[in-house]
Structures are given as structure tokens and as C-alpha cells.
Image (cartoon, rainbow, N blue to C red):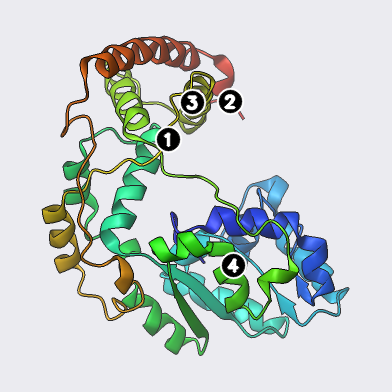
Amino acid sequence: MGPHKTGTKSIQFFLQENRAKLLEHGYFVPESGNNHGGHHTIVRQLCGEEVPHHHRRAAAKFIEALGDTRCEAVIISSEALERRLRNRDYAKAFFKTVRKVNLEPKLVIFARNQPQLINSRYVEVVKSFRRCEAFEAFVRAEIHHSTFRYSDLIALAEGFDAKLIPRPFTRETLDRGVVVDFLQTIGLDPSRFDGTNIRRNRTAGPFTVSVARDVLRLTASLGRPLTLLQARQCKRKLTAYLQERGLAVTGYCGLSSGLARHIEKEWQEPWKEVFAADVGREFAPNDFEITEPDEHTQRRRRQVVDEIVALTKEIMVDPMLTPESP
């Protein structure tokens, strides 16, 4: 059940690629409502949420397929679940439906130290062309967001008599492999599967963050915010552009050690021992607004910003990406 930026894309890709083999081991992974391995549509429907018309059969197909399998274990993966289960009505609908089909829910969540999680979330929203404020401003705005509070999930599990299985998402988890950890958690031997060393959706680097942030600031001056479709297309264009030119490096860090300690102090979590390996780490920011890069990098960055702004303006006038388009 996520949350975002804790290896869920890697787990979902593995589930999608190994569905047949997991079935051989008695684990059923639904095909319906599958979006690159994530069961977001199924989760939304199990929570009683409305979905677009062309997705409305997803949960029903899942339940029908469930009746045709002899497997006693089912794996559903979606970051959407972590947020929706915090809503009492959604949680009530979810657990009622799950038990109605004779399943007992076990909730696996990868807990990540809040400074590292906030850092990764910032990169994601910036490179997705949704936010463009400075990193520290983002921290001030988001530091108390409920998604960073894991203790609520303890009460959730107790309230609905569900088993909660917290796992750490730390440097050690990344080194070992989050898929390996997940398989062991649900009772499977990772050595029986190939391709468990998957790394998906790696954190972008300071160059990518700086370019996306500047492009969004410049295009915002036109007075028209990007639609969701436009923002997605901008992200694709930027990603492809940087990859083609060898500029898609990883490893952005907006954190200083002092800011990380401040964030940790704000979150005195009862689960701190879960991700203890990452608590108290030292950080040196590489954000271009905090640590100015050399002149060559600056010139290259300005050139890329100009070219991506031009591409973005083309996207903004594309009739297929307007709010009225289906």
C-alpha cells in the first residue's frame, strides 16, 4: 500500500512481469484494472469510489477471476490505498468488500524516514511540472501532511482487525532490493524468481529539477496553468530530451543536515525504529539554488531551459491536450 517513493513501482513491475510464476506458487495477481502493475482502479472501486466509465468493470472482473482460481493468496499493489484508507468511509467499504469475498487483509507498508521521503516527493512533483517553489518552501508547506504520518495506520489496522506489516525503506533496503524484501515479507523465496533487482522511477538529479522548475516558472508567467495532460506531456518531453543528451543523472538532494534534523524532530514517530538505519544521516544539498554549479553547467542548463520552454509552449497550444479534450 505504498506510500509513493518507497519502491512500489519496482514491486508492481515485478508483479506484472512474474504473474504466471507467482500463480504457480499459489499467489494470484489480478490482471484487470492493471496500470503498469499497479491496481489503482481496483483499489478505488473496492473503497467505493467512482471511476471513469471505461474502468467500471475492473473490480467486478477481479472478483470473477478470483472465483476461478484455487489460490488462497491474492496480491494487490497500489499507492492509492495508503491515502484512501485514511478516510473512514473508504476504509469501511474496502474492508467490507474484501471480507465479503472471503479474504483476510494484510497490509504491507514500506515506512521511510520523513526527510528522505519529503526530498523524493519534491523531485517527483517538480519533474512532473506540478510545483515549482524552492525546496525549503515545499518543506514548510508539506511538512505536516498526513501522508508522512505512519502512526494513523496503527489505529486503522486495529479498528478494522487487519494485520499491519511495516517494513523499512532505507539505504539497506535499496542495497538488498525492495522486491526481495517484499517477497520475503509475503512468504516467498526470492531465489525462486528472476529479475528481483529491479530499480524503477529513480530520483532525478539536480540538473533535471532545476530545468523543470525554471520551465514551469517561466511558462506560469503566461497566465495559464498547465493541465494534467499538458504536464504529463512536458514530463515525457523533458525526460526524453535529457536521456538523449546524457543529462539524465540521478541523486537530487535539497536537504541539509540541519533541515533533516528539523523534519525528524517534527515527526517523533512510534515507528522510528522501523527506519532507524536512515535516522540522523548527514546531508549536503546539491540543489542549484542552494549550491551554484560551475559556469559550464549553468550555460548548458540555460540552453536546455530555453529549448524545453519552446517545447512547452507548443504543448500548451496543442488542441489534443486542452482541458476540453477527452
The image quarter containing residue 275 is: bottom left
Judging by the rendered image, the residue that carries numbered circle 1 is: 128
Q: Amino acid at mark 4?
A: Val
Q: Amino acid at mark 2?
A: Ser
Residue 247 image point, x, y percent: 43, 24
- As drawn, is 100 to the left or to the right of 152? right
Using the rendered image of the protein, determine whether residue 38 is visible from the camera's viewpoint. Answer: no
Judged by depth in the image, the label closer to the viewer, 2 or 4, is 4
Cα distance in 3D space between marks 3 and 4: 36 Å
Q: Are marks 2 and 1 in contact (CB under 8 Å)?
A: no
The image quarter containing residue 110 is: bottom left
Q: What residue appears at the point 77 percent right and 82 percent down from the top-left corner?
A: 72
Q: Is residue 158 above or below residue 307?
A: below
Judging by the rendered image, the residue that carries numbered circle 4 is: 180
Q: Amino acid at mark 1?
A: Ser
Sequence-first tag of 3 and 1: 1
Residue 27 image point, x, y percent: 75, 74
Q: Is residue 5 above or below residue 97?
A: above
Sequence-first tag of 4 and 1: 1
Judging by the rendered image, the residue that carries numbered circle 3 is: 230
Sequence-first tag of 2 and 4: 4
- As drawn, is 5 to the left or to the right of 58? left
Q: Amino acid at mark 3?
A: Gln
Cα distance in 3D space between marks 3 and 1: 10 Å
Q: Are marks 3 and 1 in contact (CB under 8 Å)?
A: no
Label annotation for residue 325: 2
Q: Are marks 3 and 4 in contact (CB under 8 Å)?
A: no
